Image: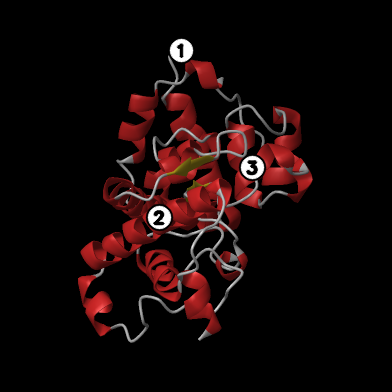
Amino acid sequence: MLANIQSFKIPITSLTAIIYLENLSERVNLLSLYQKIFPEQWLESTISIDKQSHPASAYMDREIEFIQLVNDHLFPIEYIDEIEFSSEHNSIPVSPQKIEWWYEDFEELEYSEKFLLSLTGQGYNISQWELNFGFTPDYIALAEEIYFETLVKLCRRYKSPLQYLDAAIRIIDHSTENIWLDITCETSDWLEWTYENIMFLGQKWKEAVSMMEKSNKLTHLLETSLPARKAAVKIWNKASKS
């Protein structure tokens, strides 16, 4: 009962009035989006619109329910676990799904990450390949010598996960043109809660998951197959300008 009374408390200062109106505007927006994006769940929900189980939170229970649905069905919401304690409405956070490789100790990276970075000239030098990858290439083309369109065409000739080599390189290089995969700690962003932004992020997340699944298949192959590692170098070198 107290929570309900609190939600309708009249603001008595200009500051509290502004906060009150901002929260009300955000609440109307989120509930409208809930109805539009998840109409079935909206109709089936048993939560009252004015119910607020967490008085310290800026969010009503229905708003939390909506954001949870977005997290479950469309794309991850970074602050989902703290939303019940948030004192203000937040925009949609778009941030890296894992720490960028350049912030990690190189030796602590996954095997495939070290291989791909070394292939693109950002890891081990060629004299260290035998020890780390089981063979020494005759040479490795420089990244600036690679025709990426040619690399893509060469990859598509394979039916094995080697066909995803270009995608894996794009992911580790943050050059996929997908907001979820290219975002870094330096470029993290917040988008407003709009229908267009939600649909955009949902579609891009679906594409990102597909790319990551393909990359994971290549990861397993590179970790377990010496011939595959040699083939990856061959593909890379063939795509060079020289």
Residue at far front of view: 12
> x%, y% of residue 61?
45, 75
Secondary structure state at the residue bearing disc 1: loop
Which disc is residue 26 wearing? 2
- Of the residues under marks 2 and 3, which one precedes in the sequence? 2
> x%, y% of residue 214?
41, 54
Task: Tell which tag, 2 or 3, sits nearer the viewer.
Answer: 2
- Residue 195, compared with residue 49, is above or below; it is above
Residue at horizontal 40 percent and vertical 20 percent from the top: 147
- Of the residues under marks 2 and 1, which one precedes in the sequence? 2
Task: Tell which tag, 2 or 1, sits nearer the viewer.
Answer: 2
- Of the residues under marks 1 and 3, which one precedes in the sequence? 3
Name which residue type carries label 1.
Answer: Ser
Residue at horizontal 40 percent and vertical 55 percent from the top: 26
Secondary structure state at the residue bearing disc 2: helix
Is 192 on the left or on the right of 99, as rendered?
left
Q: Do tag 1 and tag 3 residues touch (Cβ < 8 Å)? A: no
Q: In the rendered image, which quarter is residue 238 located in?
A: top left
Name which residue type carries label 2.
Answer: Glu
Which disc is residue 242 wearing? 1
The local crowd at label 2, few if under 14, some if 14 to 19, many if 20 or more residues have their Cα within 10 Å, is many
Q: Is residue 168 at all visible to an observer of this figure?
A: no
Task: Tell which tag, 1 or 3, sits nearer the viewer.
Answer: 3
> Colour scheme used in the picture?
secondary structure
Name which residue type carries label 3.
Answer: Glu
The CA distance from mark 2 to mark 1 is 57 Å
The local crowd at label 1, few if under 14, some if 14 to 19, many if 20 or more residues have their Cα within 10 Å, is few
Q: In the rendered image, which quarter is residue 51 located in?
A: bottom left
The CA distance from mark 1 to mark 3 is 31 Å
Q: Is residue 60 at all visible to an observer of this figure?
A: yes
Residue marked by disc 3: 100
Residue at horizontal 55 percent and vertical 53 percent from the top: 16
